[in-house]
Amino acid sequence: MRLSFLATLALALVPIGAASVGAQETSIVVASTTSTEDSGLFKHILPLFQAKTGIDVKVVAQGTGQALDTARRGDADVVFVHAKALEEKFVADGYGVARFDVMYNDFILIGPKGDPAKVTGGKDVVVALKAIAATKSPFVSRGDKSGTHSAELKLWTVAALDPQKDKPDWYREIGQGMGAALNTAGAMGAYVLSDRATWISFKNKDSLEIAVEGDTRLFNQYGIILVDPKKHPHVKAKPGQAFIDWVLSAEGQNAIRSYRIDGQQLFFPNSEQAQRKKAG
Amino acid sequence: MQVNGSTRIVDVGSALDLVLSGDPTLLRIVGLSLTVTVTATLAAAAIGIPFGAFVATSRFRGRSAIIVMLNALMGLPPVVVGLALFLALSRSGPLGGFGLLFTPSAMIIAQTLLILPIIAALTRQAIEDLWLEYAHELTAMQIGPIGRIMTLVYEGRFALATILLAGFGRAAAEVGAVMIVGGNIDGFTRVMTTTIALETSKGNLELAIGLGIVLIALVMVINAATWALRAWADRHAG
C-alpha cells in the first residue's frame, strides 16, 4: 500500500527529470509587440541569428506600452516596438542606450463587409474616422497603450474627435492584443485599426475586409533599443547589442525582407546602416 | 461552432494529429505543461497537506481565522496571483535578484501559490473528519501530534489523492498567472493554456479548440489513472 503510493509519486516525478530545461547557453530577453510575434516574423529571423551567434533570443510579446514598461523594470535586455514618441521618451529618460529604426509597414482600417459607415475604398483615414463617428458605427479600440492604440488615438486627434474621453456607445475599448481586437471586431461587425502584418497573418478574417489603406498618416515604424546597463546592471548588454547589430545589418534586414505570407511581404526593412551601405 | 453566423467545422482532428504524430513543438509544450503543473502540485502538497493536517488536529488561538482564510483563498483569482508574483520577481521587485521572471520556475511558483490554499483547506476538512472518528483511539494509544498527523494522512490517502487532483486540475487549467510571470516565450515558457490563448488571438480558432480538447483529454487520462490506482489498491488492501 505505502509502496504503491510512493510509486505514484515517483511516476509523477518522471516528467520533471525528463524535461531538461535546456543547456545553459547565452540568451537574451527581447520585449516586443504582438504584431512581430503573432505574424511569425521572429520564428523566421531568430533561427538565422541563433545559427550565426549561438545566442538564444526569448521574446516576450506585449503591447508597446507594456513592453517598454517591462524593459523599464529591467526585465528585458532589448525592446523592439513601434511607437516612436514613446521609444524616444524611454531613451531620454535614461532607460535605453539608443533607438534605431529597423523596419516599417503600415496600419490599415479594417471594417465589416456591410460597411455601415460607407468608408470602404477611401484613401483618407481621418475622413473615414469622422464618418464612423457620424454614423455611430461600432469601432473596436485596443485600449491597451500598445503602438497601434497610440497610433489610433493620434488619428482621432487629427479628426478633432476624442471618443476615448467621451466614451460613446459605438466606441468599444477592449484592452487586448491585436488578434483579440480583430476577433472582437469580426464578431461585432465593427471597424478596427490594425497593423498590416497581424491582418495578413490573421486566420479568422471572415466578415472583415480592408476599408482604408495607403494614407501616409498610417505609416508604422518599428524601432529597437538596448536597455541601458547603467540603469540595470544585469542587462546582457553584449549579446543584446549583438542582436541589435545583426537586425540592423544587411543580413538581418534581408531576413526581415524575405519574410512573406502568401507571397505578401509583411515588414519593410529601413535601418540607416543598411541604407547607407546601399547608397555608398 | 457558430462564428459570425457561418458554420465552421472544428478541426479537432488536425490538433490530435499533431499530438499523435509527435510534432516536437507541441510535445514540448505538452511536456512543459505537465512538468510545471506536476511540480507545482507536489510542492503545494508538500506544504499544504502537513499544514492542513496540523490545523485539523490542533486547537490554538487564531485557528478559526486560519480556516476562514484558507477557505477564502481557494478562490484566489489567478491573474492577481500572477500580478503579485510578477511585481515580486521583477528585477525592480524585492526578489528581482534571482532573475526568475519569465522562466518556468516562476510559473511553478505561481501555480503552487494558486493551489496551496485549495490543498490545505480541503486537507484540513478531510483530516478533521477522520480525526473526529479516530480521536479516541489515537489519544488512548498515546500517539504524539506528529504520529497522529502521519496516521491520519495515511488513512485519508485516497481522499487526499482526490484533493491533489483538484489542485492539479486547477493549475493545469490556469492561464492568467502563467501568462504574466512566464511571458509565453516560444520554446521556453509556452504551455498549453497560453498556446490556446495565443492561437485564439491569431484567429486559429480550430487549432485553439483542438488544443483545448487535447488538454482536457490529458487531465482526464491523469484522473482515470488515479482512479484505476485506487481501485487496484482497494482490491489489494483486502
Image (cartoon, coloured by chain):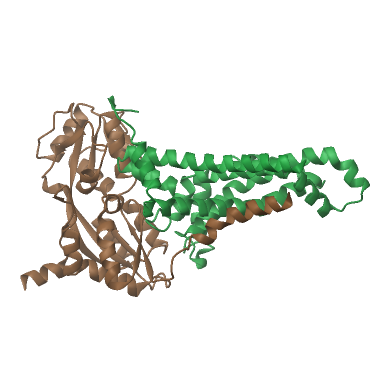
Chain colours: A brown, B green
- Find residue A108 and report its image quarter: top left
> In this figure, what is the number of numbered marks?
0
In percent of the image, x 15 and y 62: which residue is there?
A: A270
**Rendered-image quadrant of the C terminus of chain A:** bottom left
Up-down: is B216 above or below A252? Answer: above
In percent of the image, x 39 and y 57: which residue is there?
A: B187
Asked if residue B62 can be seen in this view, the reply is: no
Asked if residue A275 can be seen in this view, the reply is: yes
Horizontal side of residue B65 vs A25, given as left or right: right
Nearer to me, B69 or A61: A61
Q: Where is residue B177 in the image (x, y as percent from the top left)?
A: 49, 48
In percent of the image, x 39 and y 61: which residue is there?
A: A72
Nearer to me, B205 or A169: B205
Nearer to me, B93 or A167: B93
Task: Give the farthest residue toward the right.
Answer: B140
Up-down: is A30 above or below B155? Answer: below
Horizontal side of residue B139 vs A128, given as left or right: right
Q: Position of residue B237 (x, y in %)?
A: 76, 43
Task: Give the farthest residue toward the top.
Answer: B5
- Find residue A14 and report its image quarter: bottom right
Task: Give the farthest residue toward the left.
Answer: A279
- Find residue B130 and report its image quarter: top right
In percent of the image, x 42 and y 55: which residue is there?
A: B28
